[in-house]
Amino acid sequence: MHFNTKKFIRNIPLHVMILPALIVVIIFSYIPMAGLVIAFQDFSPIAGFKHITWNGLDNFRYLFDLPGFSTVVWNTVFISVMKIFAGLTVPVITALLLNEVRVNGFKRSIQTIIYMPHFFSWVILGGIVVDVLSPSSGIVNMLLKSLGMQPIQFLADNNWFPYILVITDQWKEFGFGTIIYLAALTSIDTSLYEASIIDGAGRWKQTWHITLPGIRPIMILMLTLSLGNVLNGGFDQVFNLYNPLVYSSGDILDTMIYRIGLQDAQYSVSTALGLIKSVVSFVFIGLGYYLAYRFAKYRIF
């Protein structure tokens, strides 16, 4: 692979544009990575760096021997994969439905309503979810009671909690993701629909044979780029919604890092866990970009 001088010169403005962001990333993301060495130490903030005890891979062995560690890994992957799948299907279906709306004012109103939750933090939305799903005064359980059913403790039931995380995550994010697919729909050649009408194709066949193939590259791109989130279950959301009753189904790597590092003050162990998570995520991000280029011809420049 030879160096293309003309292409490099042509892309200089792009490199200059990302330079400020690159500097910020270096200062706040790469320089602090020097602290990862404490994953291989018995670090104590009281003793400081002057009295460092190196323990090799003991912190990693301690992690793997922790009871429930495999459950936490499974919870993280299970919740993340469900969120990735829902994050692909729900926005696509919503975009297809909105694309059929011909009243622009109504269409824009719906768009505004569905993507507004994206701009609220999980501190606010978590409080709303807790109130809505409250077993005593929540609107969902009040409806269940009116139907003669017993109230359900959604946020204290291990059978319900992972799915509540996925549903509420989509409530917050699907509207914003819909924008991407609505933009992709505008790039489809309208003459294809005109030709299909002449051939007698209905709306369903037009959607199946024209619309979905037209946005398939964007769907593949979004799916492959989301692979880097396989171990990101969503700390903000889980932290604001979970409790010790649902640790067995809702505890993820990020919340485990928080408890071990900040609550138990085992800084070396939490750093080791964070390092494992970062390495695996890095591999999946690299794989995602490769697949994005392989199947969707996606490149940064």
Image (cartoon, grey):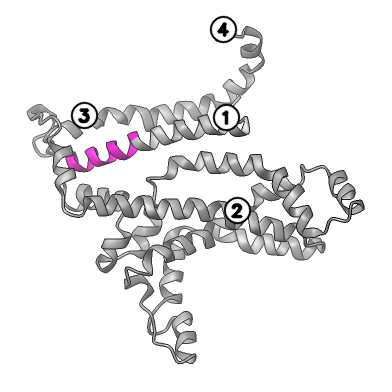
What separation in Å lies between label 3 and label 2 (alpha carbons)? 38 Å
Picture quadrant of residue 16: top right
On residue 294, which mark appears? Answer: 1
User: x%, y% of residue 57?
Assistant: 15, 32
Q: What kind of residue is marked 1?
A: Arg
* Camera-side mark, 4 or 2: 4
On residue 71, which mark appears? Answer: none
Q: Is residue 259 magenta?
A: no
Where does label 3 land, which residue?
A: 37
Q: Which residues are magenta?
A: 267-279
On residue 176, which mark appears? Answer: 2
* Camera-side mark, 4 or 1: 1
Earlier sequence position, callout 1 versus callout 2: 2
Where does label 4 land, which residue?
A: 2
Marks 3,4: beta carbons within 8 A: no
Picture quadrant of residue 2: top right
* Camera-side mark, 3 or 1: 1
Q: What kind of residue is marked 3?
A: Val
Q: Describe the element under mark 4 as helix, strand or loop.
A: loop
Vertical side of 66 occupied by 42: above or below: above
What separation in Å lies between label 3 and label 4 (alpha carbons)? 37 Å
Marks 3,2: beta carbons within 8 A: no
Vertical side of 260 occupied by 151: above or below: below
Picture quadrant of residue 9: top right
Looking at this view, is 82 or 173 the one in front? 82
Q: Is residue 274 magenta?
A: yes
Residue positioned 46% across, 32% down in the render = 287
